[in-house]
Image (cartoon, rainbow, N blue to C red):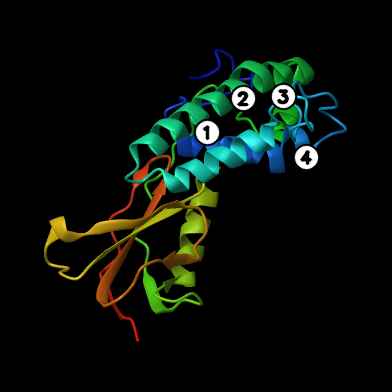
Amino acid sequence: MASKHPNEPAMHCTAKDFLLVNEIATRVITQGVYANATIFVTPPIPLNSPPPPSTVVGFKNANDLLGLLIGQAKGNSQKVQDRNAQSKAVYDMLNLKLRPYVKQIANGDLTVINKSGFDNNAQPQKSAVPDSPVIKKITEGKEAHTAKIFLDRKKKKALAAEKATQKSTKGNTYSAQTTTTPDNEESWKTVLEAVSSTKLIIPNVTAKIFVRVYAINAAGKSKPSNPFPFTQQ
């Protein structure tokens, strides 16, 4: 949804855009409403859940749960339902509680809206689909039967510079796939999904595999990196 006026805090997403809901909520916590307490003195939702017997859910707690469910949802129908329900809950906190509060405090002041973590533009800013990641190397992880992916830092910096030029606030997440037969497209299986860090740890590695990584942002999904071989020692 979008605001009708550019001087209103805007949310250019729906509850189904769970990655973007999580990203906006994180921004509101770390850079916005809760990080600027001298401006936003009395948010309508507490940052953290009060202790029992209170049943009020804090905004950070709700968003942390959404992030956890995003990471657990792949291949689990119940977790997918839980993730979608939690995305709706966080979205409603943002849209029905925090956005009207910011609008009231800002009173059309773009500087205040910018500090809130919400967008002040009535029209969504265009964001380019990220380029394919480049795997620099893969090593054994600290835990048994795990592998750690290192992405090319120069490529990462180039993507960050491009993103800054576009004035985009939407960060990349990464997904990783593995296979033992890289020429068979249907054999690729997703082993990591929606990881916001570039420190990618693959679990359950017991043989020679090939790895590829996708970068994802609000505009879409990149083409995969070139397959990279790894053999568990």
State left or right for residue 59 relative to residue 195: right
CA gap, disc 1 to disc 2?
Answer: 9 Å
Contact flag, marks 3 and 4 (Cβ < 8 Å): no
CA gap, disc 3 to disc 4?
Answer: 20 Å
- Where residue 219 appears, as percent x and y from the top left, is 39, 40
Q: Is residue 71 above or below residue 155?
A: above
Q: Which residue is mark 1?
A: 21
Q: Is residue 155 above or below residue 72?
A: below
CA gap, disc 1 to disc 4?
Answer: 18 Å
Which amino acid is tagged 3? Val
Q: Which residue is mark 2?
A: 94
Contact flag, marks 1 and 2 (Cβ < 8 Å): yes
Q: Is residue 217 above or below residue 213?
A: above
Contact flag, marks 2 and 4 (Cβ < 8 Å): no
**Residue depth check, mark 3 versus mark 1: number of the one nearer the observer:** 3
Q: Earlier in the sequence, mark 3 or mark 1?
A: 1
Q: Residues within 10 Å of mark 3 (few under 14, many from 20)?
A: few
Q: Which residue is mark 3?
A: 56
In the picture as drawn, the residue positioned furthest to the right comes out as: 38
Which amino acid is tagged 4? Ala
Q: Residues within 10 Å of mark 2 (few under 14, many from 20)?
A: many
Q: Is residue 21 visible?
A: yes
Which amino acid is tagged 2? Leu
Q: Which residue is mark 4?
A: 35
Element on which disc 2 rests: helix
In percent of the image, x 63 and y 30: which residue is there?
A: 118
